[in-house]
Structures are given as structure tokens and as C-alpha cells.
Amino acid sequence: GELFTHWDVIDGNPEFVDDLTKRETFVTIPEEGRLELRAMYEDDLTGLVQLLVKRGSPDGYYNPGERIKITAEIIEGRTFSHWDVIDGTPNLVDDLKNRETFVTLPEEGRLEVKAMY
């Protein structure tokens, strides 16, 4: 889902809007000119776990306990060594020494891993 963040003034004077941060607000219609507003939203990330994969992919937000395949970048002249857990505690990592492996995300918070060469 998405969460309302604010009203964006596309055209006109924002002082005609009571509160740009409230989903429901009052607008005074100007006598001259025009007033055009756009509702702005952001993704609702409540309850999701953030996965950060340094020197690899995929970064993103996932359901707690979800099993995600991570892949280290290929860097010319370097050989992949292992995955290093920087932050968080994965429930399970299939194989820390494999360039492509699976991690099972924790139940809350975030998990940050880094490909080491």
C-alpha cells in the first residue's frame, strides 16, 4: 500500500492551502489565477525487513522470514571469497562461500550483507 505524505503545489500560491501535510485540508480558491495540487504518496513499508546487499543484489524490502537469492557482482581481476554479514542476523544463509546463495530474512529490522573478494 501507500501512505499519504503531503500536497505538492503544482501551480498557484501555497498560502491558499491550510496545511500541506494533512491528508484532509482546507483550500481557499483564489479570485484570480489558479491553484493546482497533487497528493504525494510513498510506499508503506510497515512490517517489512530491509535487505542491503553491498557489491551485489537485490536490495529491497521483503516480508519477514522470506528466503531471498543474493548474487555478488563480478569484478574483473578479483575472485569472490565469501559473504560478510555487516548488520542484522539472518535466520539462515545457505552457503557463505558461494557467489549466489540464499538468505532467510530476520523477523524484524534489517539485514546488510557484503560480498568480499
Image (tube, grey):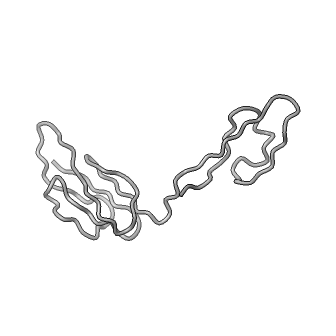
In this rendering, would 40 be left or right of 100? right
Q: Residue at x 50, y 63 (%)?
A: 46
**Horizontal and vertical percent position of residue 40:** 61, 46
Residue 13, x across and y down, in percent = 77, 34
Toward the right, the furthest residue is 31
The spot of residue 75 in percent (x, y) is 17, 40
User: Percent position (x, y) of residue 96?
Assistant: 17, 60
Farthest-out residue, top: 33
Image point 80% across, 49% down: which residue? 26
At horizontal 74% and vertical 54% (from top left) the residue drawn is: 24
Location of residue 30 (image quadrant): top right
Q: Residue at x 12, y 41 (%)?
A: 78
Number of marks present in the image shown: 0
Question: Eyeballing the image, is 49 above or below 37?
Answer: below
Looking at the image, which residue sits at the far front? 1
Q: Is residue 30 above or below residue 104?
A: above
The residue closer to the viewer here, 23 or 77, is: 23
Left or right for 29, reference 1: right
Using the image, determine if residue 4 lies above or below residue 91. Answer: above
